[in-house]
Image (cartoon, helix red, strand yellow):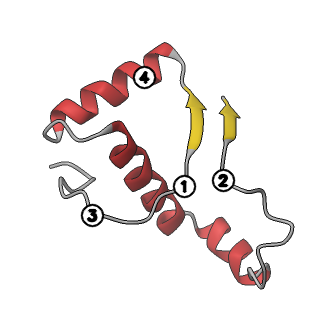
Amino acid sequence: MALIPKVEPKQDKKNIAVRLDEETHRMLQRYAAFIGNASHEYIIVASLKRLFQKDREFKEWLDKNPATSERGLQSTDDVSANT
């Protein structure tokens, strides 16, 4: 059973650029095929949402660091993640 549902909900989006190593990209392609040819974008978003939901330390950090404003946060527009 897939951990990510096959439904792709419509939402407003922000753009980012991500570079993946070959193995991660290959596994992303294979997972897309596994769940019915979902888009890479959908898999990445669903994976991040699952990560944010399951990470207890991150939840604790969020409780201690409420987002009272967008100031000080890095914009997700045109951000390149060089991993």
Marks 4 & 1, CB-CB < 8 Å contact: no
Tag 1, which secondary structure? loop
Residue at which label 4 appears: 25
In this image, 42 relative to 38: left or right? right
Residue occupying image coordinates x 42% and y 45%: 44
Q: Amino acid at mark 2?
A: Thr
Cα separation, mark 1 vs mark 2, equals 6 Å
Q: Residues within 10 Å of mark 3 (few under 14, many from 20)?
A: few
Of the numbered discs 1 and 3, the one sitting upstream in the chain is 3
26 shown above or below 42: above
- Label whose residue precedes the other's in the sequence (4 or 2): 4
The residue at the point 29 percent across, 40 percent down is 39
Q: Secondary structure at mark 3?
A: loop
Task: For mark 4, give the secondary structure.
Answer: helix
Residue assigned mark 3: 9
| Residue identifier under label 2 | 76
Residue at mark 1: 14
